[in-house]
Image: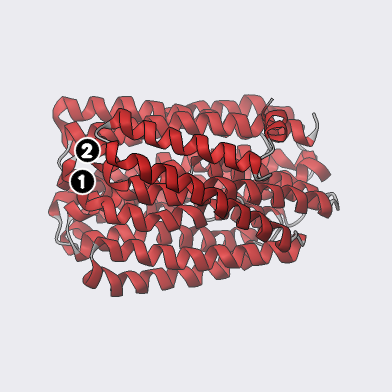
Amino acid sequence: MSLADRLSRGLKATFGANVVNMLSNAALIIVLTRYLLTPEEFGRLNFALSVLVVVSILATLGLPKSVARYITDFTETDPGQIPHLVRRSLMYLAALTLVVSVGVVVVGRPVARMLGETALVPFLLVGGGYVAARSGTKFLGATFQGFNRVSWTAIVGVVNNASRLVFVVLFVLLGFGAVGALAGYVAGFVVAAAVGFAALYFKFYRQYEPADEVEEGLTRRMLEYAVPLTATRGANVLDKKVDTVLVGVLMNMTAVGYYTVAKQVADFVAVPAASFGFTISPAIGEQQSGDRLDRAANLYERSLEYVLLAYIPAAAGLILVAEPMIQYVFGGEYLGAVPVVQVFSGFILVNAVNKVTSDGLDYLGRARSRAIVKSATAVSNFVLNLLLIPTMGVVGAAVATVITYSVYTGMNVWVIHGELGFSVRRVGRHVGVVCLVTVGMVAVVVAMLPVVSGIPTLIGAVLAGLLVWGVLAVLGGVLDVREVADFLA
């Protein structure tokens, strides 16, 4: 199968799965916010989830991405080492996960008391299972990516999100409240992990005949490469979750509910870019490993151009429709999230660029460079949150995220430019045309906003903007319909 066919197949599978996941998560968030939980309960659930995601770093460190990188390498050079690599990585992962999961259960009560939130105790008791189950699915996702079979990552994600929706709603309706919702998250991870590990064993592991001898230094190299990846992943998780934790500590759980709704909107909009980036990252590394730098550079450049074409207008449009979207989708109780959503429009743009950049650096062997930048910006984000939340409230947390993530993304683009040498001038010209397209789209949306009175008219305004965007993009020469159709065929 050619590179283009593999990328197309992987992108369609990942994007399709992410759309399903997005719809599942959207349904879950809407049901929880509008019908099942109060803003305070919703905030407490997401505060607990943020704390547990941060703790989960210790349960996997950088092992999943390190394993994925070496699977990609050995597929080309020495396939017989892959079974040894998978076995050893699972052994270390199991040990780490056990220690961290037990630790969460043991220290849950004293931590909740220290935070002044005794209501968090049952969340942290359930949290041990959350950490263990989440670690397994993270390992599976990265491993399938390393095999360049992201369709299986997509399948695991769909199973996880579909199961989560069912179990969360079921447990809350049974009267377990927000704690039941967390247990539903655990159940979803468990079902997905069962499916994923079965696929890993029967579809991949058994297909490789183990080499008679383990390559000298295999474990050491795997663990050594995991160190910068741990720093990067830890900094990334802290960067994404420390703001939510600090909003809860410095403000209240209702504010966490507002902030979570805004971040969920940003995550939903990032789905196409996430699919694209996840699919092309191993391919970029594969092209570089085969000394095909021109092809790798062209692959990244075209990806970046299409992401900018989609997300510059998306960011502008979100600023305009934020208020009616929150009002009619999540309910009037969450209108406090409107300014946060508007500020997050800047995050959506830089996050989209980062989605097609950061993972590629890992596959190009530049994990250490990314780790250094990410660690510095994560610390900066923490400091900015401490400074801005007391003075600007929830909006301050969003401003801190946009500033630090913009710096991080800019540095990643600079590093990958040093590796691949793509044309900055061509990308710059592309951005200029996209901005003109955005102006035309914004004019149409602004004209339609006065008639928006509910979800149908809101959807109508968004679709009108999309139509104008598509027409102007084709006329401006920045969207090649035939190229997109051939790629997705």
Please, which colouring scheme is shown? secondary structure
- First in sequence: mark 1 vs mark 2: 2
Report the quarter where the C terminus lies: top right
> How far apart are the alpha carbons under marks 1 and 2?
9 Å
Q: Residue at x 38, y 31 (%)?
A: 460
| Residue 93 x, y percent position in the rendering | 52, 47
Mark identifier at residue 33: 2
| Residue 248 x, y percent position in the rendering | 22, 59
Q: Is residue 140 left or right of residue 256?
A: right
Dot 1 and dot 2 residues touching (CB under 8 Å): yes
Q: Residue at x 21, y 52 (%)?
A: 336
Q: Is residue 313 left or right of residue 298?
A: left
Report the quarter where the N terminus lies: top right
> Element under label 1?
helix
What's under tag 1, amino acid-wise?
Answer: Tyr
Q: Is residue 196 visible?
A: no
The residue furthest right is 291
Q: Which residue in the structure is indicated by mark 1? A: 334
Q: Residue at x 18, y 31 (%)?
A: 35
What's under tag 2, amino acid-wise?
Answer: Thr
Q: Residue at x 61, y 58 (%)?
A: 432
User: Relative to the observer, which residue lies in front, 100 or 13?
Assistant: 13
| Residue 40 x, y percent position in the rendering | 15, 47
Q: Is residue 415 above or below residue 481?
A: below
Q: Is residue 457 left or right of residue 469?
A: left
- Residue 22 position by quadrant: top left
